[in-house]
Amino acid sequence: MTIALDYKPAQPNLFADHISGQRIALIPSLILESGHELKSCQVAYKTWGQLNATRDNVLIVCHALSGSSDVADWWAPLMGPGKALDYTRFFIFCGNALGSPYGSSSPLTANAETGRPYGPEFPPTSIRDDVIAHKLVLDALGVLSVAAVIGGSMGGMTTIEWPLCTPPGFVKAVIPIATSIAQSAWGISWSEVQRRCILSDPLFRDGYYELNQQPTSGLATARMVAMLTYRSGESFEKRFGRKPSSQRKHFIPPTVEPACNGSSTHPSVNLPAPPSKTPMRQFSAQDYLDYQGAKFLRRFDANCYLHLTHKMDMHDVRRGRVPEGCHSNLNGEGSPPDNITAAVLSRVPSHALVVGIESDVLFLPTQQHDLATSLPDAKLVMLKSPDGHDAFLLEFERLNHLIIDRLKSQFPTMYEGFVERVANVDMSTLTNGTSVGEMD
């Protein structure tokens, strides 16, 4: 099968245009885990650095749900000489997940049989499908083996699947961050709430909407809900507290008339006027959520969002892999760590570095412990951060040091003459209007 590495789609994708410098590979036919055949499968990807003579100095970076192939956008402080993602020593590859709006085949791309965008008819894809598709691109690039796979959140799920979906020994090391063995009931439930926001928007129209008529209210609200799971109560309280909204200019608080003679009857209350179609915000936390919702509308598609949340819900490394002779209900009745999970994950390279976040309310610390316990000789490091799940996109200095230490210990010859650089960053330079990252 011949794979084109520089395919130019005939149909424009405005969301993919946000990603500068990426290439698109074209796989003639990809059989998905669901059994569907995805014809003319597009895989958007970016690379940095050069392959060495033995074609094994490869770092794969896997993005999260709303990320893209442009690691330099959402993990910029970790990229560069002397840093974790050092393209002077490694060939760095990041492929865009199937179903994402940023260039890979998705509800936005054309169905090869009809010539029209798939929309809600795009077939379901899994994390494993992403690995298979990206492996085909690496093969076409001439990669013979991979030094390490690194990723957080949905990207952490992909990280774990890489050695399970490829030949033994192809991947030498994995660094899963803020992720899980399987999507939890808690995670599935949060995703379902977000999907309901989109599905209940009248503009959704069962997914058959025009791109200039997206279900904006539903998608923005879904993003607001997601942001509550990406941060923590502590971080919101510290950042916002009860600070007033920037729009709170003419708000008159309710006045309460004291009850007479100690009466227990309810006092009369002078309430403000009924809210308009767009309620006036009173607190800065509301400003933040509105900002995140509006920002997301400029860079994401509702059908793609539904697709990717379903993809995450289906993640379970044990699915279809229970060793012969083992009997276990893998429909949520039991939980890892257990012998079956350990047997499935025994194919993952030993000495994995598992990184969790103590304040993560989406991928809980117990899930990081279960993952590390189930992997062969893995090391668990918990980041102390008030920023919740999104700390994997914010704790640059700590992650930089942890990743470098792990890679240096396994690949010492690649680090001759290496001098570590601190991954500090001016946040103001990373929150521009074209960014598809989650920095702010």
Image: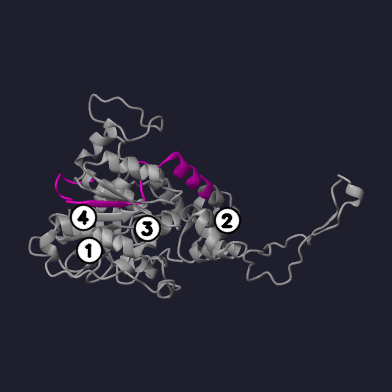
Does residue 343 appear in the picture of this structure?
yes
Q: Tell me where residue 405 appears, x and y as whole percent.
A: 22, 59
Q: Total of numbered circles in the picture?
A: 4
Cα gap from disc 2 to disc 3, whole angstroms:
34 Å
Tag nearer the camera, 1 or 3: 3
Please name the residue that numbered disc 2 is placed on. 203
Q: Is residue 175 magenta?
A: yes
Q: Residue at x 46, y 55 (%)?
A: 230
- The first of marks 4 and 1 along the sequence is 1
Q: Tell me where residue 359 appears, x and y as whole percent.
A: 44, 52
Please name the residue that numbered disc 4 is placed on. 148
Q: Residues within 10 Å of mark 2 (few under 14, many from 20)?
A: some
- The first of marks 4 and 2 along the sequence is 4
- The first of marks 2 and 3 along the sequence is 2
Residue 392, label in figure: 3
Q: Residue at x 76, y 66 (%)?
A: 252
Q: Residue at x 45, y 39 (%)?
A: 185
Compare residues 225 and 362 and report the one nearer the observer.
362
- The first of marks 3 and 4 along the sequence is 4
Tag nearer the camera, 4 or 1: 4
Tag nearer the camera, 3 or 4: 3
Q: Amino acid at mark 2?
A: Leu
